[in-house]
């Protein structure tokens, strides 16, 4: 257990995350849908949390912020695990290798399920057989790259 674990964090809304991160600050970029901070255990690792339906959600109540779900830094040497709730850091128990593997598997399955749910439906009204009008720019680029690679 680290002795310099942080119990509070302050938030700062920014357009761009600074190159040098200040310990104890959660930088939130709304334009890039990302929150970044130094690991709250004090190891100095940079923690990046994408904000999306399949990753983390951010709640701002006008004074404090919360991230959900927990932050499990299992690819770091510290393997720290905590929640950021109302600018407080709530520490969780350490996870075993099996729990980490299971958590990663659940997260991957959730992301895949979400991606399947977001696939465009055929737009028959417009005579658009591939639903391209309903797809995002990123989806269209991926499709185009896939066709180039396969063709």
Image (cartoon, rainbow, N blue to C red):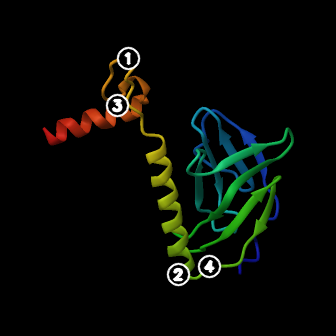
| Vertical side of 90 occupied by 121: above or below | above
Q: Residues within 10 Å of mark 1 (few under 14, many from 20)?
A: few
Residue 10 at x, y percent in the picture: 79, 50
User: Label 3 vs label 1: CA separation?
Assistant: 18 Å
- The residue under label 4 is 95
Helix, strand or loop for disc 1: loop
- The residue under label 2 is 98
Q: Residues within 10 Å of mark 2 (few under 14, many from 20)?
A: few
User: Of the residues tagged 4 and 1, which is closer to the observer?
Assistant: 1
Helix, strand or loop for disc 2: helix
| Vertical side of 124 occupied by 150: above or below | below
Q: Is residue 63 left or right of residue 103?
A: right
Residue 43 at x, y percent in the picture: 63, 68
Q: Residue 119 lies in what quarter of the image? A: top left
- The residue under label 3 is 140
Decide which of tag 2 and tag 1 comes sooner along the chain.
2
């Amino acid at each position: 257990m680290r002795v310099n674990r942080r119990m509070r964090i302050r938030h700062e809304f920014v357009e761009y995350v600074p190159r040098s991160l200040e310990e104890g600050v959660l930088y939130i970029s709304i334009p890039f849908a990302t929150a970044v901070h130094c690991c709250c255990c004090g190891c100095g690792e940079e923690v990046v949390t994408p904000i999306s339906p399949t990753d983390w959600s951010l709640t701002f109540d006008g004074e404090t912020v919360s991230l959900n779900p927990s932050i499990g830094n299992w690819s770091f040497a510290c393997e720290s695990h905590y929640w950021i709730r109302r600018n407080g850091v709530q520490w969780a128990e350490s996870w075993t290798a099996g729990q980490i593997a299971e958590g990663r598997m659940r997260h991957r399955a959730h992301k895949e399920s979400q991606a399947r749910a977001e696939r465009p439906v055929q737009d028959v009204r417009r005579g658009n057989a591939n639903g391209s009008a309903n797809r995002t720019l990123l989806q269209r680029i991926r499709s185009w790259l896939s066709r180039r690679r396969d063709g």
